[in-house]
Structure formats: C-alpha cells, structure tokens
Image: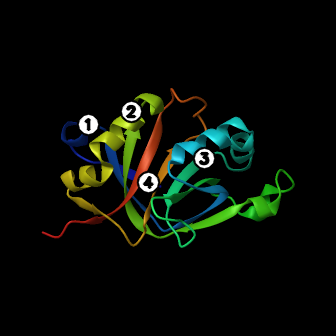
Amino acid sequence: METTEVKDSRQLVGFPVKLGHSPGLTLTGFSKIVTSGGEQYGLVRADGRWEILRQVGGTIYGAASSDRDCPKDHYRYTVAVQTPASEFGNVCRPEDLFALQVRESDWLVFQLEHFSRQYGQLWQADPYALVQKLGWFFASRVGLHIDVFAPSYVSDDDAMEFWMPVRKARS
C-alpha cells in the first residue's frame, strides 16, 4: 500500500503516522478467538507457524476482528499473509487455515520503531482517540485493525506498523 506522511503526526500523537488506501485484501493464516491478540501472536511465534507464514507470504499481518463466533469480551486474532490457501502447498493442513476478507478503506499507519517498547504505549494512548486527534474516525464498517510485520521483522525489538481503518471526520 502506498502511503503519504501525516504532517506533524509525531508531535500530535507521539508516533509517526502515514495515510494510505487499500482496495481490500484477503488474509490467510492461523486464527484463534482470544481476549488478547498477544496470546495468539506468542503461540504462532513459538510453534513454527510464524516461519511457515514467512516462507509462504513474506509480510505477516495480525488482524484483530470480531464475528459471531466471538463471545463477549473476546475477538478473533488471525496471524496471516496475503497468500491464498491453495499456495500453502503441504506446509500445513488446509483445515488449519482461516481466510479473512478485509474491506476497502483508507488506513492510518502508525509506525512503531520498537515493537516491545512501543506497542503497549500505543494502546495506553488509545489508537481510537489518536485517529480522532489526526482528524479521522475509526471506520467501523471495516471493523478490525491490523498489526503488520515486514519481512525484516525477526524479534520483538524490531519495527512494525499498526494499521487502523479510517474515514474522514466531517467538517
């Protein structure tokens, strides 16, 4: 996704932020209903599925979404790539994969230079409030947000992005 820098974002919200537009995407990977995405992230990192995703798709996405299978105070966290299930070959069983459709949207892309140090800071600052400080609103019709780990991401000390779907605030 091509992005442009959001002027003065670091001063306004404490993080560099870019704005981009995605026509929508399909993510395929491993999903679990959780109370914290960190639970699924940790499992996938520890049991070898992270390396399967990296091998198949390069950039890894962690999508936090809600659906009818999620009980109260839970959500679905899917660790995935933009690769169809058919291209996973025999590196995992097809029934272990979950496909998630992400709708077209504008996105604010928060750039975190150090995942383990800054991810908690982002959530303490409340990304839903931060997008409003930048003149946008959460696009609830998309209904999810995405953690994005580039191929260069190998440890929790590395940089990553947090994507929040947005719509422009009415003037």
Closer to the camera: disc 2 or disc 1? 2
Q: Is residue 32 above or below residue 123?
A: below
Distance, label 2 to label 3, CA atoms, is 19 Å
Q: Secondary structure at mark 3?
A: helix
Earlier sequence position, callout 1 versus callout 4: 4
Earlier sequence position, callout 4 versus callout 3: 4
Question: Seen in the image, is 153 located left or right of residue 4?
Answer: right
Q: Secondary structure at mark 4?
A: loop
Q: Position of residue 35 (x, y in %)?
A: 50, 52
Q: Secondary structure at mark 2?
A: helix
- Residue at which label 4 appears: 2
Quarter of the figure with residue 164: bottom left
- Residue at which label 3 appears: 40
Packing grade of label 4 (10 A; few <14, some 14-19, many >=20) is few
Foreground of the two, 148 or 156: 156
- Residue at which label 1 appears: 14
Q: What kind of residue is marked 1?
A: Gly
Q: What kind of residue is marked 4?
A: Glu
